[in-house]
Amino acid sequence: MQIKFIFVSFVCLLVGCATTLENPNDSQGDKNSDTRTENPSGKEADEADKEKSSSGKNELLKKLGNLENTLKELESESNGIQTEMNSRTSKVIQNKLDEVKRTLDVLNTDNTLLQKESDALVNLPLIKRIEYLYHELISKREREKLEQTRFVSVDEPIETRSDKAKKKTRKPKTAGGKKRRKTPKKPIAKKSTIPKPIKTPKPKAKSVGKGRIVVVSLSTFSGGQQKTIRNSFFEVLKAKKKKSRSFILYTIQSGKQLRTLLTSSQLRRLPIEGGSSSILGKLETGMQFKAKDLKAFADLSKVIKSKRKKVGRVLYITDNKRIDSVNQKQRDILLKWNKAGGRLIVLTSGSCSVWKQVKAKCRALSNLKGTLKSFM
């Protein structure tokens, strides 16, 4: 307010001086005209003009003096205002410096903000950087306070949903004032927390081949069974010469040797009779039942183990030689092959009890001719 008042008075003085300086002789001109009219003599008029001009100069000097004093007062006042302003700014700067020091102290104790914002604040000035970090720290503390208030204290009892439901479903007292008897609730069976065992799928057995083989054990069949076997094979092969399935005829000879006697492709090329290279000649020379060291079950399990990937159907002709010497390992070979899709037909002159244990179709040797026709 003081500054405004001084400034207005200063402007008014300037305006007044300007008006007096612009028209110093207007009033004098009027007076001179009057004096001239009153005093027509020339000398008197000049003297009067000189007196008037000297008095106007004196007044002007007085005004200038007053203006100079006013300017000095204004200057001293402005100096006081400036010092006051400087003191205020110094206080603001001091407060700012104190705030910066406090910020630096806080940031020294919590370096996570500096590490987190170091990349974003590289290009900022120091003051801007410190201010930003200070505000970040304050907001972080406020967030921590809010998160702490969200959690319920451990000492405070937590009201569960069941408690709330009990309050809502309380039944009113009866008219007699007696409370109703509460029927005891049946205890709810707790679910077992023991995890159920995960059922691992059993690995699927590898599929077997599609080949068909006929295996004849050349052990010592009794009586005329040897001739019956040869004649049955000759009659069936003769009939199937042009329309037979793909097959291989094997024989197990002395020393447990597996030999190929005839194949379906050879059956189509070879003549029926006429020397050792004919069908009849191969049967007569190849089927000599004289082996005494064979074991019916062990020999077949050995054949299937070596042919399981190519063979899916097996017809086995045997007299159950040494069938009692069977172990579990030999059974497992046949059972795994059967599980993978293999099928076994056994024609024997002995018992079928052992062969049924490995899921084989066991028949009497008397069914040889009919079985050969359907198999080949």
Image (cartoon, rainbow, N blue to C red):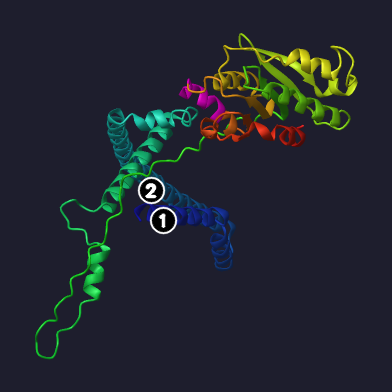
At label 1, the amino acid type is Ser
Across and down, in percent, residue 366 comes to 67, 33
Disc 2 residue crowd, few under 14, some 14–19, many 20+, Cα 10 Å: some
At label 2, the amino acid type is Thr
Q: Can I make out residue 155 in this image?
A: yes
Q: Which residue is mark 1?
A: 9
Please state the extent of the stretch shown in magenta in the rendering: 325-335
Label 1: element kind: helix
Q: Which residue is mark 2?
A: 70
Residue 255 versus residue 296 in the image, above or below: above
Residue 142 versus residue 363 in the image, above or below: below
Residue 354 or residue 85, whichever sits in front = 354
Q: Can I make out residue 49 in this image?
A: no
Q: Residue furthest front?
A: 223
Assign the C terminus to one quadrant of the image: top right
Across and down, in percent, residue 276 comes to 84, 11
Q: Quadrant of residue 88?
A: top left
Residue 315 versus residue 283 in the image, above or below: below
In this image, 109 relative to 121: left or right? left
Label 2: element kind: helix
Q: Quadrant of residue 242?
A: top right
